[in-house]
Image: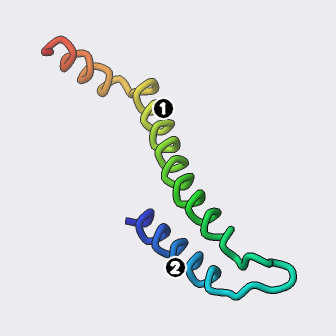
Amino acid sequence: MFADVAALAIAQAKVQICKRPADHRRTFGCFRFEILGAALNAVLPLIAALYLLQEACQRFFYLPFAATVTLSVQLVGL
């Protein structure tokens, strides 16, 4: 849910920035911010997914004894 709100906030910010008119410094306006916002919207879920994968691997490889017994019994049951 936080990722959805963050994506919407980034999208809203890039729309507001892109509405700015062109000036002598930015002759094409601020349309590059739209590309940067899209890239940021693509990278943030990847970072979240990598973090979740890292946490899952840590929990899988460093199980307490009771979880190890439970996991081994479940694997035998398969």
Residue at image point 40% right, 28% down: 60
- Residue 53, given in percent of the width and then of the height, sits at 46, 37
The secondary structure type at the circle numbered 2 is helix
From what the image shows, is residue 76 above or below residue 35?
Answer: above
From what the image shows, is residue 73 above or below residue 18?
Answer: above
- Residue 66, given in percent of the width and then of the height, sits at 30, 26
Q: Residue furthest front?
A: 27
Residue at image point 44% right, 63% down: 3
The quadrant holding residue 4 is: bottom left
Residue at image point 66% right, 73% down: 31
Residue 12 numbered tag: 2
Q: Label 2 is placed on what type of residue? A: Gln
**Circle 2 Cα neighbour tier, 10 Å, few/some/many (<14 / 14–19 / ≥20):** few
Residue 69 located left or right of residue 78: right
Q: Residue furthest left?
A: 77
The quadrant holding residue 35 is: bottom right
Residue 40 numbered tag: none
Q: Nearer the viewer, residue 27 or 32?
A: 27
Q: Which residue is mark 1?
A: 58
**Circle 1 Cα neighbour tier, 10 Å, few/some/many (<14 / 14–19 / ≥20):** few
> Do residues under tags 1 and 2 come within 8 Å of each other at their CB atoms?
no
The quadrant holding residue 34 is: bottom right
Q: Label 1 is placed on what type of residue? A: Gln
From what the image shows, is residue 54 above or below residue 32?
Answer: above
Q: Quadrant of the C terminus?
A: top left
Q: How is the image coloured?
A: rainbow
Residue 77 located left or right of residue 8: left
Residue at image point 62% right, 86% down: 19
Q: Nearer the viewer, residue 24 or 32?
A: 24
Per the model, the C-alpha gap separating discs 1 and 2 is 36 Å
